[in-house]
Image (cartoon, helix red, strand yellow):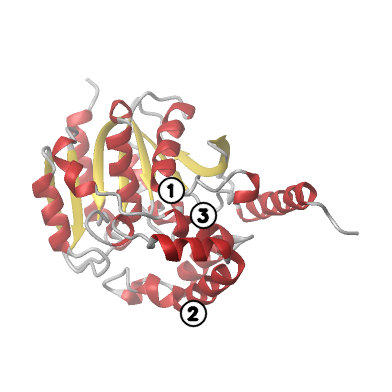
Amino acid sequence: MSLNRPQAFHLLMDTFTALQNQLADADSQFLDCNGFRVHYKRAGTGPTLILLLHGSFLSLRSWRRVMEPLAEQATVVAFDRPVFGLTSRPLPQDGGGARYSAEAQSDLVAALIGQLGFERAILIGNSTGGTIALLTALRHPAKIQGLVLVGAMIYSGYATSEVPGPMLAVMKAARPMFSRLMKFMIGKLYDKALRKFWFRQERFSDEELAAYKAEFMIGHWDQAFFELFLATRHLGLEARLPFLAVPSLVVTGEHDRAVKPEESRRLAAELPEATLEMIPQCGHLPQEESPEAFVAIVTEFLKRFTVN
């Protein structure tokens, strides 16, 4: 029996929900926000909210070593960003075409803060999660109490990428072919790319890599990721940095190969209220590779937000 489009869509959503439930942990939670079924985990009960935004090809798993220590001072929430982890992956046929733009993701973050029961939050963003954190502070300044930008992509990569208009039209018209091509390329390069995030790659176990891969490559992940790719554009963040009046901490790994330490130094210099911290013997993921040092640095920064 053939299915019409609405029937096929609902079957697809039911299948993905089943996968979400199958892969979820005992402490996993879900909420509906801005068209997504968002997967998140929550720790702590403090009056301050810390919201954790992971980088591309990862998931909230990236914060597993630092959530509990940070939760001693605040309510800490880590969530799977759109296209990654166990958060749903809506496609254009149900009105999801614009949901993967950086602006839409920043709006999702702002909405999440309210749905979690808070008026403001301190955002800690790693890599492209740092891009979205900074953009959220620019678009929703009343919602953001502070920023921790960890190897944040501001001057390169995701924040400055854009497909030329004519090529974008071709890619949109031939979505199935290009999404299959991207699926093939990511499948070939995924393991190597994630290992390069680490300075000491021997500390990134095969089990951890497999867990990330299993959470990312579920459902129609290739189609959803292609929609995110199509929605990527040059954000022009560097010109807006002088207007961002929010306490900020910029963190970089000494051996970050994805976002060079020089970019983080520049970011700290151009943000009006920023300080810089460098973690030695560490790559692009300080919260994973050097969790004790990361927590110590962030804890010191958080002291300025302590409620007396």
Q: Is residue 45 left or right of residue 146?
A: right
Task: Give the answer, above or below, for where 261 lies relative to 72.
Answer: below
Residue at the left extreme, as displayed? 269
Identified at 50% across, 45% down, the residue is 99
Q: Which amino acid does label 3 sit on?
A: Val
* 3D distance between C-alphas at marks 3 and 2: 19 Å
Q: How crowded is mark 1: few (under 14 residues within 10 Å), some or many (20 or more)?
A: some
Which badge, 1 or 2, comes first in the chain's sequence? 1
Label 2: element kind: helix
- C-alpha distance separating marks 3 and 1: 11 Å
N-terminal of the two: label 3 or label 2? 3
**Quadrant into which the C terminus falls:** top left
Give the residue drawn at x 56%, y 52%.
86
Q: Name the residue under label 1.
A: 101
Dot 3 and dot 1 residues touching (CB under 8 Å): no
- Relative image position of residue 252 (x, y in whole percent): 20, 58
Labels 3 & 2 near each other (Cβ < 8 A): no
Residue mark closest to the camera, 1 vs 2: 1
Nearer the camera: disc 3 or disc 1 = 1
Q: What residue type is labelled 1?
A: Ser
Q: Earlier in the sequence, mark 3 or mark 1?
A: 3
SS assignment at label 1: loop
Q: Mark on residue 188?
A: 2
